[in-house]
Image (cartoon, rainbow, N blue to C red):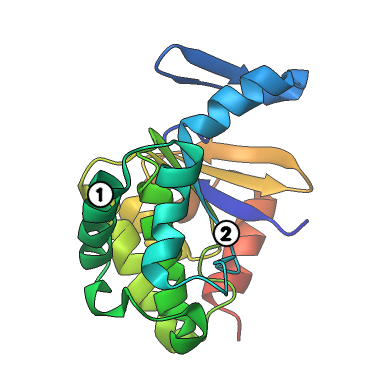
Amino acid sequence: MHPQPVGGELGRQRTGPIDDLSVDFAAHPDRATLAQFRAQSGMVFQSHNLFPHMKVLQNVLEGPVVVQRRPKAEAREEALELLAQVGLAEKADQYPYQLSGGQQQRVGIARALALRPKLMLFDEPTSALDPELVGEVLQVMKDLAQEGWTMVVVTHEIRFAQQVADQVLFIDGGVVLESGPPAQVLTEPEEARTRQFLHRILDPL
């Protein structure tokens, strides 16, 4: 596993409370606990994972209507608002293949938000994008952070982590080597491995 700095309020501890739910992943929680955790979190994947046979609006509606069984009219209105929020209101009736990678990822963010989660999880959300498309996805994530969303983000976008994260964890080989505020971990790291990684990412030549 490559070293990964992770930004987010829950990133610094194995046990993280969401309202009245506390999960210790090191203790291998049971299925019921995991299901309860998943019900309160929204996931944005590396590779979009949109349903290719569904239009953009249908992709965003699927979770609220099918899984949460919310009224379709209510969910549709909220889905359109979310698509507008991520700058894709005009793409509601298009299929994923008609969108750029950055647009598909923004649909993925809207889809996760449609579940009304208490926690947003991002797994390398820009790693599969062309460099010129990365900025549009990061801007949406910055907007969410400014709105007060709690997010856990696995990323190699160091500048983004510096600007947005409350806490950063540096993970190497599945082990947390260093944690703290971004000004400490990303600017004045204590561990030699952290310094080596940041040098390779920020000064590759």
Q: How many marks?
A: 2
Q: Is residue 93 visible?
A: yes
Q: Earlier in the sequence, mark 2 or mark 1?
A: 2
- From the viewer's perspective, is the residue at label 2 or at label 1 nearer? 1
Q: Residues within 10 Å of mark 1 (few under 14, many from 20)?
A: few
Q: Which residue is mark 1?
A: 73
Instruction: Tell me what residue is drawn at x 46 percent, y 69 percent.
Output: 105
- In the image, 164: left or right of 171? left
Which image quarter is the C terminus in?
Answer: bottom right
CA neighbours of label 2 inside 10 A, class few (<14), some (14 to 19), many (20+):
many
- Is there CB contact under 8 Å for labels 2 and 1? no
Q: Is residue 140 above or below residue 152?
A: below
Tag 2 residue: 45
Task: Find the distance from the CA under tag 2 to the CA under tag 1.
Answer: 27 Å
Is residue 190 positioned above or below 106 on the image? above
Can you say which quadrant of the picture contains the N terminus?
bottom right
Residue 186 percent coordinates (x, y): 47, 53
Classify residue 74 as left or right of residue 46: left
Residue lying at 23% horizontally and 72% vertically, measured from the top left: 89
Which amino acid does the dot numbered 2 rest on? Phe
